[in-house]
Amino acid sequence: MSMNDGKFELPYDSPVVPAMLEEDSEISFRCYPGIACFNACCKQSDITLAPYDIIRLKKRLGLDSSEFLKTHTLPYEMDQHGMPGVKLRNVNDESPVCQFMTDAGCSVYEDRPTACRYYPLGLLSMKKKDEKSDEVHYALVEEDHCKGHCEDHKLTVGEYRREQGVVEYDDLNRDWHRIILKKRSAGPAIGTPPEMSFQLFFMASYDLDRFRRFVLSDSFRKTYDLDAAFYDSVADDDIELLKFGYRLMMQVFFGEMSVPMVDKAVEKRLAERGEVIAMRHEAEKKAWQEKQERLKRDASVEDGETVVNVCGEGGCGSND
């Protein structure tokens, strides 16, 4: 998506109005159960989930994060490198209807995702390659089915965000968006991230209960120099754990060292890993040598069988 003179150049059929809005920009919109289009947007659902969305929804449904992801989401790739994202699963794979839609409205309304709260606005987070800070703007979404734009209810973007309770969501998802923007703005020099970084990103972003087990593990404690108060705080507080996950990802991905490490922990882990790798190489070498010996024996047998077979077909009784 490109931008010129404050206008976004979007596909001609995009529902996004190509104009950048700010906090004090005024819009006219209202949605309520009695409106003619009520639930229409929920019947064309395509909801990307951010970390705080999952915390709210999993608690609402009484599930741990792993079970919530398995039952209620679908994975997708956010960029060409395969950065993992998750979307809310619809009623079924063939239907675009949101799984939480009812005749009375959203069954998880108080804990609905960020994208649902923002509608009909779009959040635009941008970061220029050579700048440290990111910019936040908004765009208006106007779809034919939505009658909310016809309502005489004027308010600013900031007022609408507060009315929809999205400010808390933005505060707790902001660092996550910054990690994604920083990764993208770094350009091709970063290269394709290793699979391990994807696993960390997925755990710390979405599968928070599994991430907690990782953080509370003995191997983690041996690597990072964190006190008992820290471990007590993340043991039962998803928000504290989420914030720590952001810090850890910034350190692992971009070298922003904010999580203290045990003295020489990296060297020890590399040494341990080196021993494991050496043992693995030795086992592979032994297996290769055994394979070569087996191939030699098999080749010798096959050569003998070939002579016998050919001679048998010719009717000769010996190799002479």
Image (tube, rainbow, N blue to C red):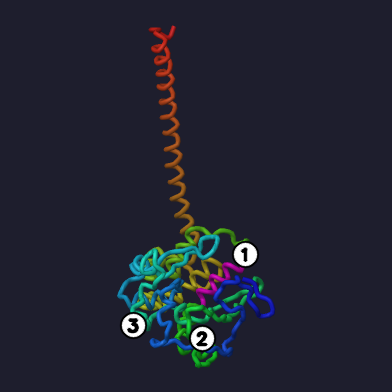
Residue kind at label 3, given as amino acid type: Ala
Q: Which mark sits nearer the N-terminus, 1 or 2?
A: 2
**Position of residue 111 measured from the top left corner of the image (x, y, whole percent):** 38, 81
Total residue callouts: 3
Q: Which residues are magenta?
A: 174-186
The answer to whether 218 is drawn above or below residue 300 in the figure is below
* Main SS category, magenta section: helix
| Magenta-drawn stretch contains 179 | yes
Residue at numbered disc 1: 187
Q: Residue at x 54, y 79 (%)?
A: 123
Residue kind at label 1, given as amino acid type: Gly
- In this rendering, does residue 264 appear at all? no
| Magenta-drawn stretch contains 106 | no
- Element carrying mark 3: loop
Q: Which mark is residue 104?
A: 3
Residue at numbered disc 2: 149
